[in-house]
Every structure is written in C-alpha cells, then in structure tokens.
Amino acid sequence: MLAVAIVVITLALVFYTIGVWAERIQGTLRWWHAGAFALGLACDVTGTMLMSRIADESDGPTSALNTVMIWTGGLAIALMAVHLVWAVVVLVRDRASEKASFHRLSIVVWAIWLIPYVTGAIGAMTAD
C-alpha cells in the first residue's frame, strides 16, 4: 500500500505543479488549470488517506518530522481546496484582472504544499 500512496501523492505533485506553473507561464487562469488543481487535490486527499491508514497500522512513535508533515499536510489540503474554489469563482466571474493576477495565490499555495511533500519524502528515506 505504501507504493500506491507514494505514486498517488507524486501524481498530486505532478497535476498541481502543471496547473500552477502553466497558469503562471500563460499569464491567465483557464478552466483546464482549475481541472489540474482539482486532480492534484483529489490525488493529495487520496494519498493522504492511504498514508494515514499506513501510519495507523504502525506501532512506532511519531517523529518530529512526521508531526510537521501532519500539520502542514492538513494546512496544504485546506489551502488547495480554498484555492480550487477561488479559481472557479474567478473563472465564473470572468474578470481579466483577477484571472491575470490569480497566479500569486497559486504560487503561495503550491510552495506551502511542497513542505509536507518534502518532509514526507525525507521521513520515508530516513525511516528505520
């Protein structure tokens, strides 16, 4: 199950990164970017649920690194959800200025999302 969780979390990284950076490079928010955000969020939630199930089956203590990953991971999922909802609002309102400046929020949410991804990877590589 760990391998599946790692693949799904990595797919979240791929989808979210493509959506965020394509939006930034293209200079305006488009519906397919919101689709990439949604796929990234879905993969992240699924991967997090799988990782949580694995952790529940483990008898070991929670390390400080895992605690950071848990808290920042929860924050990142919440921010990704808000980001997706706001993207849909911006797209529905169809204001050019909002669509052109949306990337600022995207970059911040993406950068925060990287924290639990990286801490999780480090934690997995350094586990006994």
Image (tube, rainbow, N blue to C red):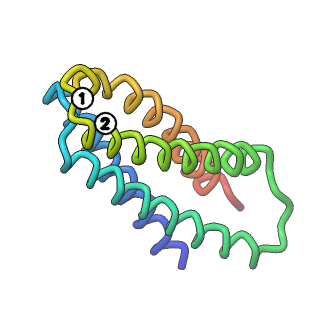
Left or right: residue 104 versus residue 72 is: left
Percent across and percent down for residue 5 are 50, 69
Quote the CA–CA distance across marks 2 and 1: 6 Å
Q: Which residue is mark 2?
A: 90
Vertical side of 60 occupied by 10: above or below: above
Is residue 51 shown left or right of residue 108?
right
Q: Name the quarter where the N terminus is drawn.
A: bottom right
Q: Quadrant of the C terminus?
A: bottom right
Which mark sits nearer the N-terminus, 2 or 1?
2
Q: Secondary structure at mark 1?
A: helix
What residue is shown with label 1?
99
| Residue 7, image x, y percentages | 40, 66
- Binning the other alpha carbons within 10 Å of mark 1 as few (below 14), some (14 to 19) or many (20 upward) gives some
Q: Quadrant of residue 65?
A: top right
Pointers 2 and 1 in contact (CB under 8 A)? yes
For mark 2, give the secondary structure.
helix
Please state which amino acid type lies under the numbered disc 2: Val
Depth order, front residue of 30/93: 93
> Mark on residue 40?
none
